[in-house]
Amino acid sequence: MSRILSNTDKTHIAKWVGEAQLISIFAHQSPDGDAVGSSLGLANALISMGKKVKVILPDALPVFYYFLQGAHDIVFFHENPDEVKNIIAQSDLRFYLDFNRIDRVGHELAKYLADYTGNSIMIDHHQQPDDVASVLFSDTTFTSTSEMIFQLLHQLDWMEHLNLPAMEAIYTGVVTDTGSFRFPVVTAGTHQMVAFMLERGLNHAKIHQEVYDTQNFNRLQLTGYALGQKLVYRPEKKLAYITLSQAELNRFHHQSGDTEGLVNQALSIGGVTMAVFLREAEEPGIVRCSFRSKGDHDVNVFARQNWNGGGHKNAAGGKFHGTLEQAIELLENLTA
Ligand SMILES: [Mn+2]
C-alpha cells in the first residue's frame, strides 16, 4: 500500500498508455459517484492525450451523473454484452477502477475479464485488493479512487491533460465518496487538490447542484416513505436499518441511484453506531446490502464475514442470497 507509484510502475503505465490503440476502463456494479467520477476523470484525460478510450460499466448509472462529459458514451454490459465483448477483445490496456475484486463487476462480466492476458492497471482505495492486475495502485488512505486519478496524472506528469471535464468528474467522485468532505479520511491533501482545481477553473457549486439538487418527485417520495415507514431503530443495539422490497421500489418508480444516501440518514441518529440498508434486487433471491458505521465499529469485517461483501471500515456493501425476510433475520441475529 503506497500513496506514491514506484518508478517501475510509472514506467510501465507510461509505456502501456503510450502504445495502446484502445484503452478500456471498468468500474464496479451499481456504479456510484466515485466509480463514474474516476472512470470519466481518467477517460477525459486520456482522450486529451489523443487516446481512444471506452468506459464500461456493468449496469445503470444514476441519472444525476449524466451531466458529466462522456457519460453518454459509456457502454453498459447489461444492455450491450456483445459490444462489451468486442471492446474487451480489441482493447490492449485495461483500467480497473474503484473495486478490489474482479467479481465486483458482476459474475458474467468477470468471466470475460478473467480470460484476458494483456496488461491491466487496478486503481482502488478499498481494503485487501486481489492480485489480479499487472500494476496495482492501492491505498486505503485516499478519500476516493477519483483522488487517486488526480494523483496518477500528477505523478506521471500528465497534469496538462487535467482538463475541465476531467476535473468535474474527479470532483464528483471526491464529493460523493467523502459525504461532501466530512469523513475522517479527508486530508489537507484532499483540500489542496480541490484548491488546485478551483484555480484551474472548476465550478464546484455547479457540481453540487447537479448531484444533490436535481431530485425528481418520485425519489423524494420514496425517501419520505423509507424514513417514515421503514426505518427500524434498535437503541439497545445502537443499530438502525431500512429495508425495501421490489414492490415498494416499483410503487415509487424506482431508478438507479434513488436510494443512494438513505443508509446515511439512518446513521445520523445520535447514538447509532451501525446503519444498514437492505434492498431486494431485481434478480430474485438476491438482497443488496449497504453498511455504514461510526468510529471504531468495523463494517468491512462485518460485510466480509457475513454478507459476501466488504469495503471500508466505516462504509461497506454486500450481497445476500435469500429473501429479504431472511436477510432481516440474519441482521437481527448477528446483532443480538
Ligand atoms: Mn470509491
Image (spheres, helix red, strand yellow):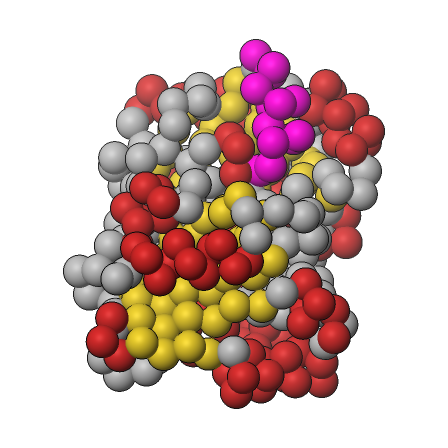
Q: Is residue 110 magenta?
A: yes
**Which one is nearer the viewer's eye here, 124 or 268?**
268
x and y percent of residue 19 in the render? Answer: 60, 19
The N terminus appears in which quarter of the rendering? top left
Q: Tell me if I can see residue 202 in this picture.
A: no
| Residue ID at (53%, 33%) | 103
| Residue ID at (45%, 61%) | 328
- Residue placed furthest toward the top: 117
Quarter holding residue 293: bottom left
Q: Is residue 248 magenta?
A: no
| Residue ID at (45%, 23%) | 133
Q: Is residue 196 above or below residue 270?
A: above
In the rendered structure, the answer to whether residue 248 lies left or right of residue 295 reads right
Q: Which residues are magenta?
A: 105-117
x and y percent of residue 327 in the render? Answer: 47, 55
| Residue ID at (31%, 35%) | 128
